[in-house]
Amino acid sequence: MPISLMYEEENYVVLEPNQPEQFMTAIELLEKLRAVLAQQQDNLPRDLQQLSSLDAQAQKLRDTYCEYEFTPGKFIQWYVVRLEK
């Protein structure tokens, strides 16, 4: 279960197979998740299928998951990080 304190920094590290780690803001991660979900509308988890918009699906995915496997062996993971200022 996500803890709201985790989302105060609004930065994420994003991991994908055969890709270097990327640091993204919450908005950048939502854009990335929207792009992934747009390709997967016929194969979504049940809780995401119930949401009518791509934006709502991406936000739910970001806030309640930390990994999404859209085809076997192809996935995206994200974790909240605190960047030093």
Image (spheres, rainbow, N blue to C red):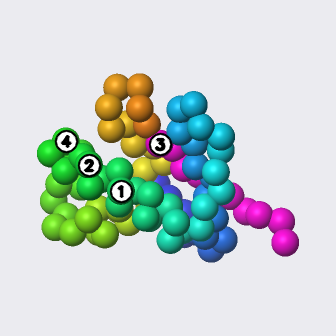
For the residues labelled 4 and 2, the Cα–Cα distance comes to: 9 Å
The one of 40 and 67 positioned closer to us in this rendering: 40
The residue that label 1 is drawn on is: 35
Say if residue 81 shows up in the picture: yes
The stretch drawn in magenta includes residue 79: yes
| Amino acid marked by disc 4 | Asn
Q: Quadrant of the C terminus?
A: bottom right
The residue that label 2 is drawn on is: 39
Residue sticking out furthest to the top: 73
Asked whether the residues under the numbered discs 2 and 1 touch, taking CB atoms below 8 Å apart as contact, a structural biologist would say yes
Label 3 or label 1, whichever lies nearer to me, is 1
| Amino acid marked by disc 3 | Ile
Disc ID at residue 43: 4
Asked whether the residues under the numbered discs 1 and 4 touch, taking CB atoms below 8 Å apart as contact, a structural biologist would say no
What secondary structure is marked by label 1? helix
Say if residue 61 shows up in the picture: no
| Amino acid marked by disc 1 | Ala
Mark 2 Cα-neighbour bin, 10 Å: few <14, some 14–19, many ≥20: few
Above/below status of 64 relative to 52: above
The residue lying at 41 percent from left, 32 percent from top is 74
For marks 1 and 4, the one nearer the N-term is: 1
For the residues labelled 3 and 4, the Cα–Cα distance comes to: 15 Å
Where, by quadrant of the figure, is residue 9 drawn? bottom right
The residue that label 3 is drawn on is: 76
The residue lying at 19 percent from left, 42 percent from top is 43
Residue 49, position in %: x, y?
17, 54
The one of 45 and 21 positioned closer to us in this rendering: 21
Mark 3 Cα-neighbour bin, 10 Å: few <14, some 14–19, many ≥20: some
| Amino acid marked by disc 2 | Gln
Question: In the image, which residues are magenta?
Answer: 76-85
Horizontal side, residue 2 vs residue 55: left or right? right
The stretch drawn in magenta includes residue 81: yes
